[in-house]
């Protein structure tokens, strides 16, 4: 079953002192382009997170974020009382006696270096275990999103492959008329020259010319590629790159058929096949 590379997953964890929001967004990309943003006190877990994301998402431009919002009354940032008092005293010594305002001096003091101190929060393994479980929740959500997105793509692919098969049948039906048309045109061209021709030699040259315009191999190969595309589409794994290679081979056979057609009704059918194939090409870029 195919997956889209476009997806979104989110999980929210409420802890006693904080709310942790985990978000994963992904877009299409040739390879895995992973951007991870997490708070500094979780940094030691970043490598494990990257491995988990790479294993689950495989390919795409992926943005992963952990946002932490403190909900408790306590804060890790405190006023460095001794430093602030010293700053205030120094500021009083600078201004004239009796004209200083303690509130204004305090506002100035807390802006000075080291007036505030932030205690680095240590990693709590029990807390991380809960966060890690919610990362799995977000991953499962984005994977399901990708599958749902791909379901509509799969329906579209099957419809367009069916259309190409229908146009291929038209090409097959027109092939005999095309050959007769080529014979008639060549015979008329010879007659217009008003010269005597060796009928046997003419037949030999005609056979040689028709062999160059023969599209039987192209028709057979294109039919095989169409069937192989549907078989690959039905496999349990998502094979976007493989499907892309099959489409390239389809394009070669369709282009060769068009260049050999030399018959307007057949070329119209070939153009329709090209149009359907271009629509598949655009969408296949988003398949994992």
Image (cartoon, rainbow, N blue to C red):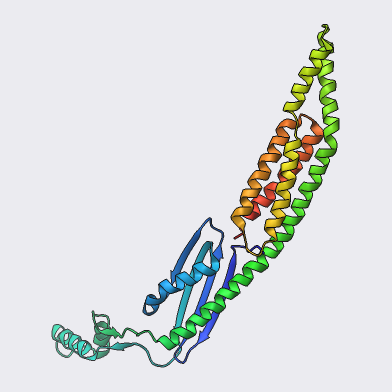
Percent of width and height locating residue 41: 37, 80
Is 270 above or below relative to 55?
above
Tally of marks: 0
Residue 105 image-quadrant placement = bottom left
Percent of width and height locating residue 231: 71, 56
Is 54 above or below relative to 13?
above
Residue 176 image-quadrant placement = top right
Decide if residue 268 is on the left or right side of residue 250: right
Percent of width and height locating residue 233: 69, 58
In the picture, the quarter occupied by the N terminus is bottom right
Decide if residue 280 is on the left or right side of residue 194: left
Residue 236 image-quadrant placement = bottom right
Q: Which residue is situated farthest in the top direction here?
A: 195
What residue lies at 17% left-to-right and 87% top-to-bottom? 92
Percent of width and height locating residue 66: 47, 76
Closer-to-camera residue (83/168): 168
What residue lies at 43% left-to-right and 74% top-to-bottom? 48
Task: Let me know if residue 162 appears in the view.
Answer: yes
In the picture, the quarter occupied by the C terminus is bottom right
Closer-to-camera residue (269/241): 241
What residue lies at 72% left-to-right and 47% top-to-bottom? 224
Task: Let me know if residue 276 appears in the view.
Answer: no
Decide if residue 252 is on the left or right side of residue 270: left
């Amino acid at each position: 079953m195919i997956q889209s590379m476009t997806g979104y997953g989110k999980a929210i964890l409420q802890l006693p002192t904080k709310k942790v929001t985990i978000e994963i967004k992904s877009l299409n990309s040739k390879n895995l382009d992973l951007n991870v943003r997490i708070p500094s006190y979780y940094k030691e877990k970043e490598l494990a997170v990257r491995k988990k994301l790479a294993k689950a998402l495989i390919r795409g431009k992926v943005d992963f974020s952990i946002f932490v919002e403190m909900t408790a009354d306590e804060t890790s940032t405190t006023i460095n009382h001794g430093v602030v008092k010293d700053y205030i005293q120094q500021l009083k010594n600078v201004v004239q006696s009796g004209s200083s305002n303690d509130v204004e001096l305090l506002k100035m003091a807390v802006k000075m270096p080291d007036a505030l101190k932030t205690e680095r929060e240590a990693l709590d393994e029990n807390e991380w275990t809960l966060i890690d479980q919610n990362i799995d929740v977000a991953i499962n959500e984005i994977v399901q999103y990708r599958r749902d997105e791909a379901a509509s793509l799969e329906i579209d692919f099957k419809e367009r492959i069916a259309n190409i098969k229908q146009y291929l049948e038209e090409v097959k039906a027109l092939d005999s008329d095309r050959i007769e048309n080529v014979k008639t045109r060549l015979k008329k061209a010879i007659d217009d020259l008003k010269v005597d021709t060796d009928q046997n030699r003419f037949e030999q040259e005609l056979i040689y010319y028709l062999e160059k315009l023969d599209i039987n191999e192209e028709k057979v190969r294109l039919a095989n590629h169409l069937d192989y595309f549907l078989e690959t589409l039905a496999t349990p794994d998502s094979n976007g790159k493989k499907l892309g290679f099959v489409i390239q081979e389809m394009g070669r056979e369709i282009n060769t058929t068009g260049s050999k057609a030399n018959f307007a009704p057949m070329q119209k059918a070939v153009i329709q096949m090209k149009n359907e194939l271009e629509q598949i090409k655009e969408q296949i870029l988003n398949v994992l």
